[in-house]
Image (spheres, helix red, strand yellow):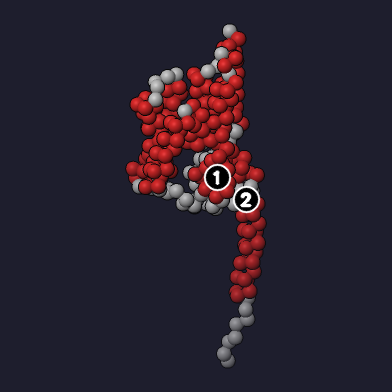
Amino acid sequence: MQAVLYQALAILAGYLIGSLSFAVIISRVMGLSDPRSYGSGNPGATNVLRSGNKAAAILTLLFDALKGYVPVVLVLKFGAPFDMEEGTAAMVGLAAFIGHLWPVFFRFEGGKGVATAAGVLLAINPWLGLSVLLTWIVVAFLSRYSSLASLAAAVCAPLFQMLIWDVGPELLAIGLMSLLLIWRHSANIKKLMAGTESKLGQKASAAAHPAKGDKAAKATSTPSSKKHGNTSSTKPKHHSK
């Protein structure tokens, strides 16, 4: 009974860690607009990159991966005395991934979970994680579509685990993450089929700058244009006699 309690607490902790939306947090710290307000509206590294701030995108990618990696590693390292081993670690990773998708701290408006899933896979099986990451890089490099690369990685993850490594308790968590990833990319699948999907590095149509700056710019430009308009319209007219 006590072991079940420890496992439940570990899974809850994984979900809470996963609920930290670093795309939003880092954007706020760096003075950028909320990533949910431009581009795809997805709070993830790819959409943050559309703001034009590469440092913010890299930090988002790193911390989103870490929040999937760290909880799993902690369970694998320190969970044995509490009857928590590979199966529990995989479920904790799945909970962190679900936390990213539906974060309790951000009105359950989360991202698609690609970086967090990569962190979970690297912690469960480093070779599997690297294989899936390499798949993502190759597809992204050839197609320039982050969504297509993510879909390819999602399909390959459980296949690689089954064909190359053991079919253990972690396969259930990997399979569920893959299915959720594909489901979260349903809108991207439609855009890919229609040829309207945004490519990697493509900036958002709406500028991702602080709202105050935008308002100030509008406030200063509007009066000046009115002033110029009034000046030209009030010039004295010379009539020939």
Identity of the amino acid at label 2?
Pro
Q: Which of 91 and 51 is in front in this view?
A: 91
Q: Where is residue 141 in the image (x, y as percent from the top left)?
A: 40, 47
Task: Give how far apart the Cα atoms at labels 2 and 1 are.
Answer: 19 Å
Q: Residue furthest top?
A: 1
Q: Residue furthest bottom?
A: 241
Q: Which residue is drawn at 55% across and 50% down?
A: 54
Q: Which residue is drawn at 58% across and 18% down?
A: 79
Identity of the amino acid at label 1?
Ile
Q: Nearer the viewer, residue 99 or 119?
A: 119
Give the label, 2 or 1, closer to the camera: 1
Q: Which residue is drawn at 58% across and 11% down?
A: 3
Q: Is residue 205 above or below residue 184?
A: below
Q: Mark 1 points at which residue?
A: 58
Q: Which of 58 and 83 is in front in this view?
A: 83
Give the position of the N terminus as an image quadrant: top right
Q: Is residue 129 left or right of residue 84?
A: left
Q: Residue at x 50, y 23 (%)?
A: 90
Q: Which of 106 and 30 is in front in this view?
A: 30
Point out the tag, 2 or 1, that comes first from the N-terminus: 1
At numbered mark 1, what does the secondary structure look like: helix, strand or loop? helix
Residue 183's disc is none
Residue 210's disc is 2
Q: In this view, does 103 lie above or below 208?
A: above
Q: Where is residue 81 in the image (x, y as percent from the top left)?
A: 60, 14
Q: In this view, does 59 lie above or below 125?
A: below
At numbered mark 2, what does the secondary structure look like: helix, strand or loop? loop
